[in-house]
Image (cartoon, helix red, strand yellow):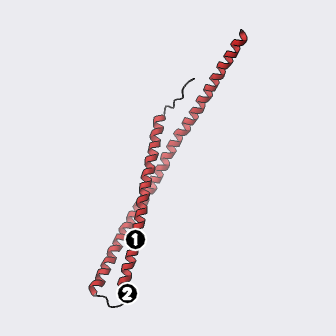
Amino acid sequence: MGRFRFSLERLLRLRTQQVHQAQSILQSLTASRLALEARLEQLRHEHETAQTQAAQPGTVLAQHFHDLWAYAQHLQQQLERQHHEHARLRQLEAAQQHHVREALKAKDVLERLREHRWEAFRRAEASQEQRLLDEVSQRRRQR
């Protein structure tokens, strides 16, 4: 019988490839965000430690006290920059998640269309096969 050909097969492969690429980018963004969150936690801990050391009562040299506060301020600035970077990564991640969903939708539409056309092809093939069987059986009766 005939052979099933889906005329949009190349487009379906392209959509599948786009889904994989979008998911790969999303995984990369998620990994970056998680690494940044770990760095933020480390910076918070270092900042708290520096503030605690600077605030301890006792005989602290003025230069040491000044160095601790300068270090604490430096850590605070790093924390703020990292928070901005974290917010930016979260926005990129959300946009990429949306992109993945859209790519999946486009791929699903093509897969459903292919399935629908496959079913129509299968029904047409079955109908043609039945006609051939009926024709063979009718010829046998005529003999």
Q: Where is residue 62 in the image (x, y as percent from the top left)?
A: 28, 87
Looking at the image, which residue is at 46% across and 37% down?
11
Secondary structure under the numbered disc 1 in the rendered image: helix
* Amino acid type at mark 2: Gln
Above-or-below relation of 132 to 122: above
Q: In which quarter of the image is the C terminus?
A: top right
* Amino acid type at mark 1: Gln
Q: Position of residue 63 (x, y in %)?
A: 26, 84
Label at residue 95: none
Residue denoted by label 1:
42
Counting other residues with Cα less than 10 Å from the Cα at mark 1, is it few (<14), some (14-19), or many (20 or more)? few
Looking at the image, which residue is at 50% across and 42% down?
107
Above-or-below relation of 120 to 87: above
Q: Earlier in the sequence, mark 2 or mark 1?
A: 1
Secondary structure under the numbered disc 2 in the rendered image: loop
Residue denoted by label 2:
56
Q: Where is residue 131 in the image (x, y as percent from the top left)?
A: 65, 20
Alpha-carbon span between mark 2 and mark 1: 21 Å
